[in-house]
Amino acid sequence: MRMRSACFMSALAFVLCTGMSAAADQDRPSGPLPPTGLLCEYLPNPAAVDAPRPRFTWELNHTERGQTQSALQVLVATDSSFERGLVWDSGRTASSNSTQVLYAGPALQSDTAYFWKVRFWDSAGRESGWSRTARFETGLLSRADWKALWIDCRGQVRREFVIDKKVKRARVHFSGLGYSELRINGRKIGRSVLNPAWTTYDRRVLYDSFDVTEILRQGPNAAAVMLGQGWYKGRVLLFQLNIEFADGEKTTLISDETWKTADGPVVSDSVYDGETYDARLETRGWDRPGFDDSGWNPAQAVPGPAGALSAQCLPPIQVVDTIVPRKMANPAAGVYVFDMGQNFSGWARLRVQGPSGARVRMRFAELLYDDGRINQENLRSARAEDVYILRGGEEEEYEPRFTYHGFRYVEVTGYPGVPTLDSVRGRVVRSAVRQTGNFSCSNPLLNAIQQNVLWGQATNLHGIPTDCCQRDERMGWMGDAQGTAEEAMMNFDMAAFYANFVRDIRDVQDGEGRVTDTVPHVWGSRPADPAWGTAYPLLVWYMYRYLGDVRIIEEQYDGLKKYVDYLRTREEDGLVAFSHYGDWVSVEETPGSFVSAFFYLYDVEIMRDLARVLGRTEEAKAYGQWADRVRKKIRERYYDAKTGRYATGTQTADTLALFLNIPGPEERGRVFDNLRSDILYEHDTHLTTGIMGAKFILEVLTRFGSSDLAYELAGQRTYPSWGYMVDNGATTLWEVWQNKTGPSMNSHNHPMFGSVGAWFYKALAGIEQSADSVGFEKIRIAPQVVRDMTHASGSIRTVRGPVAVDWARSDKGLKMDVVIPVGSQAEVVIPVFTLKNVVLREGASVVWKEGAFQPGAEGVVEIKADGSRLLKAKIGSGRYSFCLSGD
Ligand code: BGC
C-alpha cells in the first residue's frame, strides 16, 4: 500500500546519494558506524514500559562487508547528558547480541524518564561512535503507585486545577474505557483514537502515559475526557497526573468524586452501529479552564474493571491516512454515494454547511447494488451508520470518535444542498504498526494480490488482530490470527503488537488450560478449536523465530504447557479429534478431526522446541516422545495405503501431512505425487482448501521442488483463487472463495487467506532463515525463479535490520542484488541452468569461473556448486550485486 511512494523515496535517495561529490565521499567515516533504530521493548522511545527489565534492540551499521558485533556497551541514565544520573553502564561486554539485550541495572523507578545509548565493537575490535540518545519512560510500576480512583462517567468528564509554580515534569497516566479522548487546556493529547486497545478487562486493562509538561501552565488548567462505550460497553475513567515542580515539590491530580460529568454531543455510540453526534449539544470551552460546570454532576467512584493495569506497549490506533474519494454518484434523489476506490477500516470526515438541526446520515458498505445504491446485507446486524446533526452557521467538519467501519462506499443522505467530492474524505484508522515489508514482481496479478493482502492485513489490526472490520464481529479469531501471522510479520512491524496479543491469549486461559476461539472471548467456544487454539504456541514460536525473543517463551511456557496438557485430556484413542471449524471455508471438506490431530502434533512439537530453547532437556525429550507417538498414531489412523493419501485425500489433508513430515520417507513421494495430481488434473490447477490448507500448501509445494505449480496456483485467475477476487474488483481479501454479496457470511475484507503473502517473500523473493537460526542471524536467500517470472523484489525489516533481494533475469543471464544486515550471514542460492561455462560476478569481481570459486570479493566467503543446477554463496553482511552469465 505504501509501495509506490516507498519506491519513489528510494529512487530519490539514490539520486541524492549518487549526486554527492567525490570529496564528500572521502570525508565519509569508515569502519563501524553508530547503531541506529534503537528500540526498547520493540518500540521507539516508548512513553511507558512496565517490564521490570526492559529489552533493548539496535541496528548495526558498518561501511565494510562481512561485519558483526563482537562487544557492546549500553548506558542508561536519568539525565540525557549521561554526565549525571547514570543508572547502568554495561561496560564493554563481549556479545553478538544486538536484538534482545536485557537491562541489567538496579530496579527501575516508577514514572521516570530514562535515556539510553549504545556503541559496539566490530569483529576486528574497532569501536563505533555512540548512537543517538533514545529514551524510554516507566509507567506506574506497582498498583500502589496508582492513587486515582475509577470513576463512572457520562460522555464527558472534567476537572479544573490550579498550578502556582513552575512545572519541571508532568506525566498523565490514564485509562478511559471503552474508548477515550483526553484533552488538556483545550488540546487533544496524543494522536491515538479508539484508545485504549481492547483487552479482557477483568484480567488486564491498558493505560497510556503522556508527557504534558509543555501543556500545563501556571494558573488555572483543565483536564477533560470524552468517553465512548467501545468494547467495554460503559464509560469509566482512571486518571492520574503526576507533577514535579522546579523546586522539587511533587503533586498528584487524580480522578475521584471531585470530577464533574455530563452528557456530551455524542448522543449514541456503538462499534458496530455507528455514532450520532449532535453539534448543537457542544458546550464551548468545556475542555478549558474557566468553564462553568456548576450544572454538571459529580462523578461517582466505582470499583472499575478488575484487571491489572498494564502499560499500553503496542502501537496505538490512529488515523494513518486520508483517502480522496474517486467519484460521487447520485443514484436517487438526495442519495449520494462516494466511492473510495479501496476497502478499508475507519470512517468518513464530513464537510457541510447548513441550517442548525439538519441531519446528515452516512451509511457505510463494502458493496453496491446494480442500481448504484449501497448494499449493506453482508454487514448482518451492524448498522454502520453515522449521523451528524448540524450546529448551523459556518461550514462544519465532523468525524466520529467512538466507532469505526469497514467499507469502500459511503452513502450520504440528508445533506443540505448538493455535496461535492470534497464533502467527504476517507480516514483510514487502524493500529499504527509500521509497514516494513515490500514485495513486487513482474507478474501484475501477484502485485495486485499483494496489495489486497497488505490492505486486508493492516486494516484488521485494531489493538487485536481482527477477522474483519465491517460486520457485527471484528473479533480476535485465533485461527485467522495464526493463519496470517507470518505474512503479517513479513509485511509489518508486528513485534510489540503480537507481544501484547500473546498476553491477551494468556488472559483468557482458564484453570484447566483452555483458551478460546476469540480473544478477548466473545464469540466462539471455550475450549478453542485446536486449529484456533494453536495461535497460542504458534505466535510464541514465531516471536522466537523471527525476533529471537526468548523472554516471551519464559513468560508463556507454563501457560503453554497447561494448554497442551489440556489437549491431552481430550485425546480420544491417542489423538485430539474435537473440532469446531476444521479447514474453515474450504471447497472440499477435510475431516475436522484430522485438522485437529495435525495441530495437536504441531503444538506438541513446538513445546518440544521451546523446552529446548529454555534448556529443559528432560521436558524436551518427553515432548519429543509425545510428538512421535501422536505422529505415528495419525499415520496409522489416517494414511490410506491403497490410495497413498491422508484422511479423505483432499489437498488440505495431504498438505498438512507433508508439512509435518507425517508420512514416512517411503510414503512421502507418493503422497506428494497425489497432491500434485489432485491440483493439476482433478482440479485444473485450483485450490480446494480452506484457510488451514491454504496456509501451508504453497510452502509444501516449494519444499518438494514444485514452486512452478505453487506459482500457478498463486496466480490462478478463475474460481477459487486469489486472482478471482482481484478480477472481481476486490481491493482486500474476501472471507470465502465465492463471490457472494448477500446476507450470508461473506465479508469482503477478511485477511485470513493472506498467508499467500508469506510465500511471496519466502519463495519468490527467497527470504528465509536457516533452520537453526533465530532473529535472522543466519539468512537463506533462495529465490524461486519460476515460469514466466522475470523479476521479483522483496525487502523486510528484520530485528537486525533490512534484508532485501532483487532479482531479474534476461537473455543475458540473472542478476541478484542482496542486502544482509550487519551481524548476520547468509547463504545465497543462485539457480543456474548449467554449470558449464558459467561466470558469476559480484560487482566488478569474478567470483565463480571455470567451475571454481574465485576468492577476493569482500564479504564473499566461499561459493560451492550444489549438484549441477545451483551455486551456493556464503556471504557476510553488506550489499551485493551478483550477476550470472554464460562466458
Ligand atoms: C469469522 C472467522 C472465524 C470463523 C470461525 C467467522 O465468523 O469471521 O474468520 O475464524 O468464524 O468459525
Image (tube, rainbow, N blue to C red):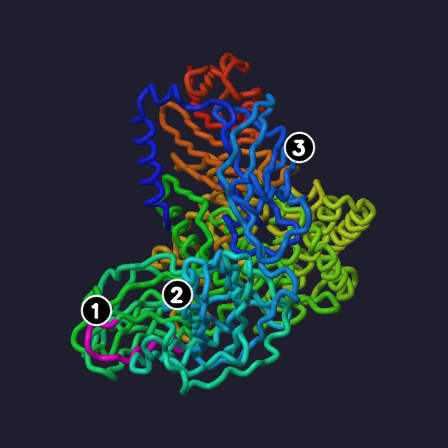
* Secondary structure mainly formed by the magenta segment: loop
Q: Is residue 579 visible?
A: no
- Exactly how many numbered labels are in the figure? 3
The segment highlighted magenta reads 382-396
State yes or no: discs 2 and 3 in contact (Cβ < 8 Å).
Answer: no
Q: CA distance from mark 2 to mark 1?
A: 35 Å
Residue at 51% from the left image edge and 38% from the top image edge: 801
Mark 2 vs mark 1, foreground winner is: 2
Q: Nearer the viewer, residue 756 or 739?
A: 756
**Dot 3: few (<14), some (14–19), or many (≥20) neighbours within 10 Å?**
few
Q: Amino acid at mark 3?
A: Thr
Q: CA distance from mark 1 to mark 3?
A: 66 Å
**Dot 2: few (<14), some (14–19), or many (≥20) neighbours within 10 Å?**
some
Residue 505's place in the image compared with 641, above or below, is below
Q: Which residue is mark 2?
A: 188
Q: Nearer the viewer, residue 232 or 817?
A: 232
N-term-proximal mark, 2 vs 3: 3
Residue at 58% from the left image edge and 26% from the top image edge: 122
Is the residue at mark 3 in contact range of ligand 1, meaning its CB lies under 8 Å from it?
Answer: no
Q: Amino acid at mark 2?
A: Lys
Q: Secondary structure at mark 2?
A: strand
Q: Which residue is mark 1?
A: 329
Q: Is residue 301 visible?
A: yes
N-term-proximal mark, 2 vs 1: 2
**Dot 1: few (<14), some (14–19), or many (≥20) neighbours within 10 Å?**
some
N-term-proximal mark, 1 vs 3: 3
Q: Which residue is mark 3?
A: 93
Q: Position of residue 756 (x, y in %)?
A: 49, 50
Q: Position of residue 850 (x, y in %)?
A: 51, 12
Residue at 71% from the left image edge and 48% from the top image edge: 610
Q: Is residue 113 left or right of residue 792?
A: right
Residue at 83% from the left image edge and 47% from the top image edge: 618
